Image (cartoon, rainbow, N blue to C red):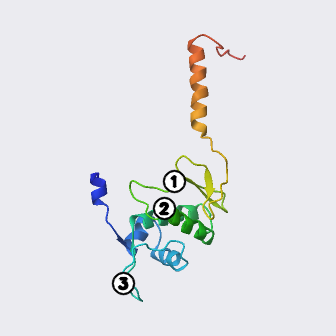
Amino acid sequence: MSSRDDTIADSFSATRAAALAGISRAMLNYLCREKVVVPSILPSRGHGSPRAYSFGDVVALRLVAKLSAAGVSVLRLKKAMQRLRKLHPEITLTSLPGSHVVTDGRDLYIRRKGETLERAMDGQFAFAFVVELAPIRNEVADGILKSQKAGVGRARKVA
């Protein structure tokens, strides 16, 4: 375990969770009330009982904040966030449900390691494959540089 793992608290108050997620306390209360993100640490129940949020809850809240800031409807995120947490209930420093979250503003997709994109709301596979463009661009650039070094296909100045 790294020293960072040792310094991360097991739970966070609502005020601290909101601050870490970059949202207001009112927004946190709204997200909890609408069950978009529900605290996974269950304290004693009842009116006035403090809510406690896990590290994974705070990560989920921050994701909702970023997607909301990008224009995605919070209520549209509800099913997707519930499914995301169901797929992988505990997001930790060493464990994530996927490598990417993608949205078209309407649906939320997640790419789990070594798999295709799937719609977070229902697990329906959305795309058969995803190709990352940066490695392709780099392969072409490397090919051009290698051929130039070999003296093949040198670029000519256009007058």
Total residue callouts: 3
Q: Quadrant of residue 142?
A: top right
| Residue 130, percent from left and from top | 63, 44
Asked whether the beta carbons under mark 1 and mark 2 sit within 8 Å of each other, the answer is yes
Query: In whole angstroms, how far apart are the C-alphas of marks 1 and 3?
Result: 32 Å
In the picture, the disc for residue 124 is none
Pointer 1 or 3: first along the chain: 3
Who comes first in sequence, dot 3 or dot 2?
Answer: 3
Disc number for residue 98: 1
Q: Secondary structure at mark 2?
A: loop
Q: Which image quarter is the C terminus in?
A: top right
In this image, 74 relative to 92: left or right?
right
Q: Residues within 10 Å of mark 3 (few under 14, many from 20)?
A: few
Measure the C-alpha gap from mark 1 to mark 2: 9 Å
Callout 1 amino acid: Gly
Secondary structure beneath disc 1? loop
Check whether the beta carbons of the residues at disc 3 and disc 2 lie within 8 A of each other: no
In the picture of the structure, the residue carrying the numbered disc 2 is 88
Is disc 2 surrounded by few (<14), some (14 to 19) or many (20+) residues within 10 Å? few
The residue closer to the viewer here, 3 or 17, is: 3
Image quadrant of residue 126?
A: bottom right
Residues at marks 3 and 2, CA–CA distance in whole angstroms: 24 Å
What residue is disc 3 on? 44
Q: Position of residue 133 (x, y in %)?
A: 61, 38
Q: Nearer the viewer, residue 60 or 148?
A: 60
What amino acid is labelled 2 in the image? His
Q: Are marks 1 and 3 in contact (CB under 8 Å)?
A: no
Residue drawn 44% across the image and 67% down it: 57
- Residue 137, can we see it? yes
Please, what is the three-letter code of the amino acid marked with disc 3? Ser
**Residue in view at x 28 percent, y 59 percent:** 7
Q: Is residue 25 above or below residue 103?
A: below
